[in-house]
C-alpha cells in the first residue's frame, strides 16, 4: 500500500524556511521532501532517491515519469528500470518508447569480433569502422548495448572467454611482440582487472592511450601499479611455449618435427578440451593473437532517439 505522501516518516528530513510554520508542526518528507532531495546536482544522489518514489503509489509513478526527462542519462535509465518493474498501465505506457537519448548521450555496445580470411591467414577485426561498413566479412556482430561502460566491458570479457572455448586457432594470424608495439595488449581489460576507472577512447591509438594511462598513474602516485603495467607489458613478448608449459606444469612437449605454431595450437586445444577459459585467456595473450574476440564500441548520439533496454544497465 502506498504511503500517505503528506505525512512525515521516522527518517524524513526537516523542511524549513516556512513562515509561519504549518498548523500541527512542520510537515516533513513526503512528495515535497522527495523533490527537495531529487533537486541535488549530484547524479548519484538523484539516482539513490528514485527508489523512494515507489513509496508514494500513483504519485510516485508520476515522479518517476518526470525523472525520465532528467538531464542525466543514468537518471533517466534508472527511472526507466523502476517503471519497467511495475504492472501499472500508466508506468508501462510511459516506457513504451524506451529511454530518451539526447544529443551527446553515450551508449556502450558489445560486439562479437569478425574473423575474416586474408591472403594466407585468418584475421580478427575488433573495432567498428565506417570504411568497412559495407563489407559483411569485416563486420562485427552486435551482441548487446549498455548505459555503463563498466557493464559492457564485463559482458565483452565473458563473451570473449566463451568464444575461446570453441575457436579454431590453427589458421589465426599471430601478432608477435616487437619493441614498443602494444597492439596485442588489452589496456582496457588490464584497467578493469586493476579496478581503474580508465578506458581508451573510441578510435584512440593504443600508443596514445598507453601514454595517457602512464600519466594518470604517475599523477596519482600509483607507483606499484605503474611497475605492474610495465611488467605485464613485458610478459607480452615472444615466449618459448616449452618454457611456458614447464612453468605451468603442463605435461606437453614439442615434438622434433613439430613447428612452434603447431605446438601452440596443440597446447591451446588441450585447454579447450579442459574447458579452462582462464588459462586460455592467458595463452591467447602469450601466444600473440592479441585482439579480443569481443569488444566494446562507444556510440555518441547526434540526435534525439529512444532506446528500449533489457538486462543490466
Image (cartoon, rainbow, N blue to C red):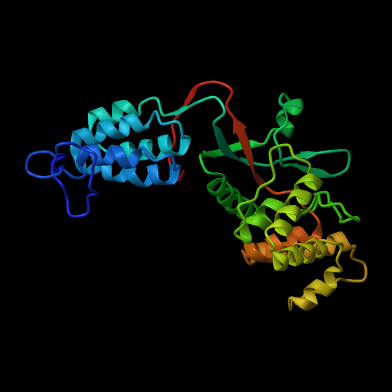
Question: Which residue lies most toward the left here?
Answer: 24
Q: Nearer the viewer, residue 1 or 236?
A: 1
The front one of 112 and 46 is 46
Q: Quick check: 59 above or below 43?
A: above
At which x and y percent is residue 6? 14, 39
- Farthest front residue? 19
Q: Is residue 268 visible?
A: yes
In the rendered view of the protein, which quadrant contains the N terminus? top left
Kindly identify the residue that appears in the image at 11 percent across and 45 percent down: 25
In the visual, does 303 lie left or right of 79?
right
Task: Place residue 121 in its image quadrant.
Answer: top right
The percent position of residue 281, horizontal first and vertical second, equals 68, 60
> Residue 81: which quarter of the image?
top left
Going 83% across and 68% down the picture, which residue do you hit?
Answer: 241
On screen, residue 259 versus residue 112, left or right, reads right
The location of residue 73, given as percent across then percent down, is 47, 34
Is residue 186 at all visible to an observer of this figure? no
Residue drawn at point x = 80 percent, y = 65 percent: 235
Quadrant of the rendered image containing residue 295: top right
* Residue drawn at point x = 56 percent, y = 49 percent: 150
In the rendered view, does 296 fall on the left or right side of 80? right
Question: In x, y percent, where is residue 222?
Answer: 69, 64
Instruction: Please indicate whether residue 175 sits to the left or right of residue 274 in the image.
Output: right
Q: How many marks?
A: 0
Amino acid at each position: 500500500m502506498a504511503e500517505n505522501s503528506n505525512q512525515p516518516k521516522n527518517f524524513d528530513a526537516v523542511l524549513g524556511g516556512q513562515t509561519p510554520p504549518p498548523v500541527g508542526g512542520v510537515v516533513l518528507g513526503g512528495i515535497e521532501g522527495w523533490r527537495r532531495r531529487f533537486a541535488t546536482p549530484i547524479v548519484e544522489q538523484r539516482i539513490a532517491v528514485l527508489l523512494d518514489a515507489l513509496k508514494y503509489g500513483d504519485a510516485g509513478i508520476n515522479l518517476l515519469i518526470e525523472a525520465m526527462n532528467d538531464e542525466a542519462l543514468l537518471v533517466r535509465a534508472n527511472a526507466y528500470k523502476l517503471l519497467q518493474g511495475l504492472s501499472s498501465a500508466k508506468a508501462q505506457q510511459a516506457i513504451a518508447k524506451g529511454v530518451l537519448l539526447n544529443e551527446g548521450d553515450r551508449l556502450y555496445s558489445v560486439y562479437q569480433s569478425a574473423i575474416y580470411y586474408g591472403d594466407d591467414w585468418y584475421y580478427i577485426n575488433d573495432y567498428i569502422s565506417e570504411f568497412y561498413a559495407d563489407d559483411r566479412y569485416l563486420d562485427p556482430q552486435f551482441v548487446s548495448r549498455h548505459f555503463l561502460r563498466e557493464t559492457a566491458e564485463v559482458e565483452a570479457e565473458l563473451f570473449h572467454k566463451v568464444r575461446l572455448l570453441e575457436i579454431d586457432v590453427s589458421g589465426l594470424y599471430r601478432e608477435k611482440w616487437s619493441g614498443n608495439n602494444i597492439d596485442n595488449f588489452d589496456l582496457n581489460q588490464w584497467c578493469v582487472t586493476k579496478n581503474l576507472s580508465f578506458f581508451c577512447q573510441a578510435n584512440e591509438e593504443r600508443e596514445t592511450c598507453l601514454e595517457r594511462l602512464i600519466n594518470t598513474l604517475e599523477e596519482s602516485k600509483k607507483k606499484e601499479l605503474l611497475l605492474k603495467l610495465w611488467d605485464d607489458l613485458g610478459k607480452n613478448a615472444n615466449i618459448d611455449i616449452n618454457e611456458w608449459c614447464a612453468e605451468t606444469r603442463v605435461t606437453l612437449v614439442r615434438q622434433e618435427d613439430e613447428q612452434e605454431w603447431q605446438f601452440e595450437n596443440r597446447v591451446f586445444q588441450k585447454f579447450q578440451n579442459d574447458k579452462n577459459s582462464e588459462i586460455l585467456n592467458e595463452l591467447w595473450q602469450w601466444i600473440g593473437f592479441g585482439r579480443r574476440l569481443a569488444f566494446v564500441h562507444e556510440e555518441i548520439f547526434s540526435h534525439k532517439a529512444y532506446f528500449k533496454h533489457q538486462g543490466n544497465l
